[in-house]
Amino acid sequence: MFRYILKRLFLMIPVMVGISFILFSILNLTPGDPARLMLGEGATEEAVAMLREEMGLNENFFIRYGKYVLGICKGDFGISYVSKAPTSQEILVRFPVTVKLALCGISFAIILGIPIGIISAVRQYTIIDTVSLITTLVLTSMPGFWLGLMLILIFSLKLDLMPTTGADTWIHFILPTITLSSITLATLIRMTRSTMLEVIRQDYIRTAKSKGASEKRIIFKHALRNALLPVVTVIGINFGILLGGAVITESVFAINGLGTLVVEAVKMKDAPVVIGAVLLIAFVGGLVNLLVDILYTYIDPRVKTQFSKG
């Protein structure tokens, strides 16, 4: 297991290098001059040229990328073009808010999605199953920004029950959590339902029923554990998606998280901030996927033997 974890961590290195190179290329080769954006359209060419020299933008592309990678290896993610503050400082101030929002979103989806999916599978073709399927269809079809605006309109403006913007208290996270987790919730309901339906039709489930095992024991002791592997996979993947997809939710609810920081940085072509933020999200996503793989061994012991062979 330890060898497998080390192998996965080493495999993340080329992935991170590839992501950094793609982002660095996009931000440096697309139209737009960061120096011009920072000084404004009224700045003179001499001032722009001086700032470009100061920022090192006149050097060769590969030299600049090599210096950037060497800096990352030393723990230096560069200086923000806009705020002139260290990029790591800019990111670490905003990142906890985004992580908290993503954790709230995935927790909300798990708490509601898995039980609803189980009930929907066990009570297939009943009114509960029909309502859950319609709900998943509606949640999947609704754009996140539209759902967020509707929640603000109803619960903040009409009923005056929830705050509209900010992330100061846990109450501020209720509407953003619902908005962010809507598609993940629908995915978990459908995945849990489909995997449970597949498992409860297996021969060993029929054998357990013929031996007189209770429905509760069959569902939670025999069926659910075998149905959890694909569900856990979906949870791990969607947590990474929620981290990266919090941009829309943070924009709608005016939350100062990593998503809004990236949007602002992209507008100003602030390459150090954009690359640093995306690399952090990718790294956390990779760690979550590794954690999911390790969790497999506790859900299904057969997976542990495969890890030991690897």
Image (spheres, rainbow, N blue to C red):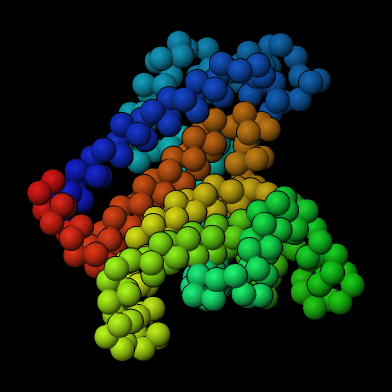
- Residue displayed at 68% across by 49% down: 248
Q: Toward the viewer: 138 or 79?
A: 138
In the rendered image, residue 262, in percent from the top left (x then y), is placed at 60, 41
Residue furthest to the front? 210
- Asked whether residue 169 appears in the rendered view, the answer is no
In the rendered image, residue 230, in percent from the top left (x then y), is placed at 39, 57
- Residue displayed at 45% across by 65% down: 197
- Residue displayed at 71% across by 58% down: 138
- Asked whether residue 175 appears in the rendered view, the answer is yes
Is residue 294 placed above or below 162 in the rendered structure?
above
Q: Quadrant of residue 2?
A: bottom left
Of the 4 image quadrants, the one containing the N terminus is bottom left
Q: Toward the viewer: 296 or 104?
A: 296
Residue furthest to the left? 309
- Residue displayed at 27% across by 85% down: 211
Viewed as shown, does residue 127 lie left or right of 307?
A: right
Viewed as shown, does residue 306 lie left or right of 213?
A: left
Is residue 166 placed above or below 80 in the rendered structure?
below
Viewed as shown, does residue 30 lie left or right of 203?
A: right
Q: Toward the viewer: 79 or 5?
A: 5
In the rendered image, residue 285, in percent from the top left (x then y), is placed at 41, 49
Is residue 235 placed above or below 122 in the rendered structure?
above
The tally of labels here is 0
Q: Quadrant of residue 291?
A: bottom left
Q: Toward the viewer: 108 or 76?
A: 108
In the rendered image, residue 33, in percent from the top left (x then y), is placed at 65, 19
